[in-house]
Image (cartoon, rainbow, N blue to C red):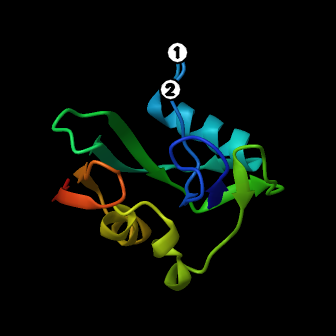
Amino acid sequence: MKKATRGVSKGKWNAPGGKIEEGETPESNARREVFEETGLKVTNLFFHGIMLYFMGGSKTRQTTVGLFSSRNAIGQLSSTVEGRLKWFQTHKLPFDEMWDDDKYWVNLMLIQGRFNAKFYFNITNTRVTRYEILSR
């Protein structure tokens, strides 16, 4: 995980990610973002599903996230301008320093669950006010 140093996730522990560039697939985007933000090359990506985010108390979707994970990575882990990196044991994840929605889906990801989800945040984006998680 990385402790973000900028952007909307500044100060939070978060997974690598970012916007899809022209010509990229969601999977190639995930591979590129992980490499750029961690120095690791991931293989055998597992697609969990799509997560939709409704931020700032809005009923209009702001962000769509394709969620991938991998248990296979090669390379040297190195922090970047995106944030400081740290490995956590799964039972010691710092949920109090992560996005509020993480407590609803991270454990599903860790057991290789397939799901789609919607998360609605309050006006300050500090708390999930409503969510839906559907198995795929």
Q: In this view, does 128 lie above or below 52?
A: below
Rendering coords of residue 73 (x, y %): 69, 56
Q: Distance between the residues labelled 2 and 1?
A: 8 Å
Q: Is mark 2 on a helix, strand or loop?
A: loop
Image position of 31 with respect to 67: above or below? above
Q: Where is residue 22 in the image (x, y as percent from the top left)?
A: 52, 14
Question: In the image as oriented, which residue stretches furthest toward the front?
Answer: 124
Residue under pointer 2: 20
Q: On screen, 40 above or below 108?
A: above
**Residue 82 occupies quadrant:** top right
Circle on res. 23:
1
Q: What amino acid is at disc 1?
A: Gly
Image coordinates for residue 126, horizontal then vertical, percent:
36, 58
Q: Residue 71 carries which label?
A: none
Camera-nearest residue between 93 and 29: 93
Tell me the crowding category of disc 2: few under 14, some 14 to 19, or many 20 or more residues within 10 angstroms, Cα based: some
Compared across the picture, whether 123 is left or right of 93 comes to left
Q: Which residue is drawn at 54% across and 83% down?
A: 92
Q: Is the N terminus in the top left, top right, bottom left or bottom right quadrant?
A: bottom right
Residue drawn where x is 20% and y is 39% of the image:
58
Furthest residue toward bottom: 91
Residue at 57% x, 40% y is 7
Are circles 2 and 1 on residues that touch, CB within 8 Å?
A: no
Question: Which amino acid, mark 2?
Answer: Ile
Relative side of 77 to 27, left or right: right
Callout 1 secondary element: loop
In the rendered view, would you say 84 is above or below 17? below
Question: Residue 18: where, in percent of width, then height?
Answer: 54, 36
Q: Is the residue marked by circle 1 packed among few (<14), some (14-19), or many (20+) residues within 10 Å?
A: few
In the image, 22: left or right of 75? left
